[in-house]
Image (spheres, rainbow, N blue to C red):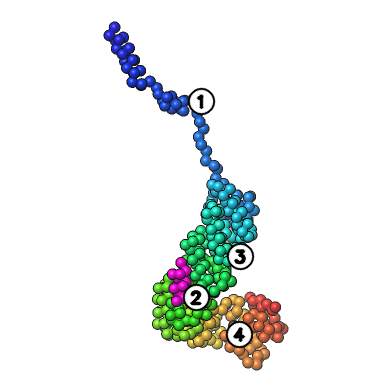
Amino acid sequence: MITLINKKLISLSLTSVGLHKSPLCNSISLFFYSSSRPKKWKSKPKIAVAEYLISQHQFSPEAALKAASTVAYLKSPAESSSVISFLRESGFSKTHLENVVKRVPRILTANPDIVLKPKFKVFQDSGFSDSDIVDIVSSDPWILLRSAANQLGPALLVLKNILGSNASVLKVLKLSGGVLKYDLEKTLMSNVEVLQSYGIKSSQIIKYIFHFPRFFVHKPESIVDVIKRVDEMGFDMKSKRFLSAIRIMTSLTVETWERKVKLFKSLGLSEDDISAVFRRVPQVFGVSEKKIEEVIEVLLSTGKYDISFIVNHPELLIYSVKHRLKPRLQVMEILEKKKLLGKTPTLTTICKYSEQKFAELYVVPYTNELEGRVHGVEIKIS
């Protein structure tokens, strides 16, 4: 009897404190046990970049695979299509598009309104035409990922101030659009001022900006250090070759420079000889060690030239062995042996001639004598 009363009391107690299943418990139970449980949310399938570019935009397999090596899949093909559509509408041809996407595959994931359009507006506001912008971007597509306000705008302003016109700025950017990635006020502008302080004329500096724009984005302190090193080698600062010497030395690491010096010494040049070569033709130090060895070997093998001749005429080290030195030496040797030349010109003069000029002077008049005797070269006459 007591047991029955206890069971009733326990039952009433549970009911009063709400320990029966709550609505939440019921819903959890339904979630796990109901036959009509909700389906799991599925993410959108990723699209293979190579397949997308080839099938949707007719990219070449080579360009598509190159892009896919960096960005393999796309989460939003629609966004990528909007990027390509914007570039097409901006004047980019299929070749231009492939070039941009190959070099900067990340551009496919960009939002045109946020990433691309502000950059194009900066160029347009600076007075560049659509075709100009295509040329600039094609030169270095990475500039599309730079800040329009903090990098591209200020860089264009510096270039315009130094070069004077959009036509001049375009000439530089078509050669190296990558200079827009730098703070040109701290690099290019400062380096121009440094060079001017050493007496280099503005006209020469401008000429170098057109041909070697990347030289001017070095840190100004490194340019100053190189100027001191060039000066220590006895270089005349008033020489037109002074700026060339600075550029060449700036492009070489200390290790590369020392390797070149070691090579020249192994070939029989003294320290003074090496300095003399650098003062006469600084560009020689931009030539590969292999080529320098080949040229010296060819010249010494003739028996006509020695190290002192090479030191006095270092420009010969720049010419191609296969396409200029060897064939022209062969031609002159044949003509000399047949005593067909009244006066033999110097080797430096012979090598300076263009292909057409050399052919007119020493090949065409002696076609029969030279036929089949000059090997491994085709001298074009046009």
> Which of the two discs, 4 and 2, labels the residue nearer the N terminus?
2
Tell me if residue 198 is in the magenta stretch: no
Label 3 residue SS = loop
> Which of the two discs, 2 and 1, labels the residue nearer the N terminus?
1
Evaluate if marks 2 and 1 touch, with contact meaning CB atoms under 8 Å apart.
no
Left or right: where 162 falls relative to 272 = right
Q: Is residue 169 above or below residue 233?
A: above
* Foreground pick, 82 / 373: 82
**Residue at 64% of width from left, 85% of height from top?**
334
- The amino acid type found where label 3 is placed reads Ser
User: Farthest right residue?
Assistant: 368
User: Farthest top residue?
Assistant: 1
State whether residue 259 appears in this view.
no
Q: State the CA–CA distance, disc 2 to disc 1.
A: 78 Å
Q: State the CA–CA distance, disc 1 to disc 4.
A: 94 Å
Q: Is residue 126 above or below residue 18?
A: below
Evaluate if marks 3 and 1 touch, with contact meaning CB atoms under 8 Å apart.
no
Label 2 residue SS = helix
- Label at residue 129: 3
Q: Which residue is mark 2?
A: 286
The magenta segment: 183-193
- Label at residue 350: 4
**Residue at 32% of width from left, 17% of height from top?**
13
Evaluate if marks 4 and 3 touch, with contact meaning CB atoms under 8 Å apart.
no
Of tags 1 and 4, the one toward the viewer is 1
Q: Residues within 10 Å of mark 3 (few under 14, many from 20)?
A: few
- The amino acid type found where label 4 is placed reads Ile
Q: Which residue is mark 1?
A: 35
Q: State the CA–CA distance, disc 4 to disc 2.
A: 23 Å
- The amino acid type found where label 2 is placed reads Gly
- The amino acid type found where label 1 is placed reads Ser
Q: Residues within 10 Å of mark 4 (few under 14, many from 20)?
A: some
